[in-house]
Image: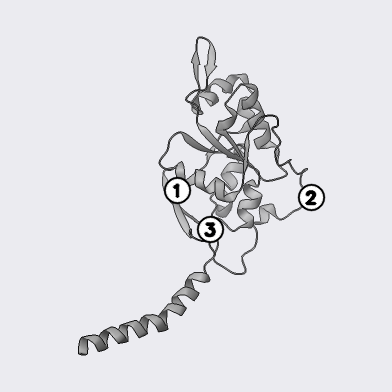
């Protein structure tokens, strides 16, 4: 009898407390309905990626101005079938890259941009390296290409999810076009068009020297 009474009390406690637990969880700013945060490695250190939880948080000041550049097309690489991806698809690649070395998250911006503010888990491979004959070979090898009989072999090339400053930035399109001209497989190229502009607009975690200034 006493045991049954205790079970009844426990059920009522769960009933009474659960709305508060649900409310507490619903107040969290989620990445997806199921995903609150995840871990990545950035320059050898673990970083938790999540959205800023402050209700009054605003977009990063580096991306406040609206007069920059001309918006890139949604599919700027036609007739090549390079995938244009959004945040959720980009995050899937970012998660997979933690355990799959065949996937690489590439910040295609020049070094100054990257080290000032970037997405954790990304590797900086500036688009300019593909335009310089002195750095081209090393860059392609970093992407998994090898020379066979004097010709670049991309059969083991990495799958890339590449980004730059945002919709208006031309650094990633320039990077991807350079790879396409070298016959890099189009199905291994993914363009995160929103880039840093979209990433920061969602309050997602960033790293960089900007915070040290």
Residue drawn where x is 54% and y is 13% of the image: 151
Disc number lying in front (3 or 1): 3
Q: Residues within 10 Å of mark 1 (few under 14, many from 20)?
A: many
Tell me which corner region of the image, top left, top right, bottom left or bottom right, holds residue 205: bottom right
- Give the numbered dot on residue 67: 2
Percent across and percent down for residue 60 are 64, 56
Q: Is residue 38 left or right of residue 139?
A: left
Read off the residue under disc 1: 40
Q: How many marks?
A: 3
* Label 2 neighbour load within 10 Å: few <14, some 14-19, many 20+: few
Callout 3: helix, strand or loop?
loop
Question: Is disc 2 placed on a helix, strand or loop?
Answer: loop
First in sequence: mark 2 vs mark 3: 3
Please name the residue shown 73% across and 44% down the image.
168
Q: Which residue is mark 3?
A: 32
Which image quadrant for residue 134?
Answer: top right
Front residue of 152 and 133: 152
- Camera-side residue: 100 or 136? 100
Between the C-alphas of marks 1 and 2, the distance is: 33 Å
């Amino acid at each position: 009898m006493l045991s049954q009474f205790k079970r009844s009390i426990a059920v009522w406690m769960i009933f009474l407390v659960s709305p508060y637990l649900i409310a507490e969880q619903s107040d969290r700013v989620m990445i997806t309905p199921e995903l609150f945060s995840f871990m990545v490695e950035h320059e050898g250190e673990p970083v938790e990626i999540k959205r800023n939880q402050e209700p009054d948080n605003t977009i990063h000041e580096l991306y406040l101005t609206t007069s920059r550049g001309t918006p890139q097309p949604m599919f700027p690489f036609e007739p090549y079938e390079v995938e244009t991806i959004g945040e959720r698809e980009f995050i899937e690649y970012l998660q997979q890259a933690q355990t799959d070395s065949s996937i690489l998250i590439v910040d295609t911006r020049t070094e100054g941009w990257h080290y000032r503010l970037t997405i954790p888990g990304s590797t900086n491979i500036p688009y300019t390296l593909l335009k310089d004959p002195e750095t081209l070979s090393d860059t392609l090898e970093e992407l998994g290409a090898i020379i066979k009989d004097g010709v670049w072999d991309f059969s083991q090339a990495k799958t890339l999810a590449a980004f730059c400053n945002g919709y208006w930035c031309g650094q990633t399109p320039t990077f991807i076009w350079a790879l396409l001209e070298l016959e890099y497989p189009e199905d291994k190229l993914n363009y995160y068009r929103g880039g840093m502009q979209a990433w920061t607009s969602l309050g997602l975690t960033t790293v960089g020297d900007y915070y040290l200034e």
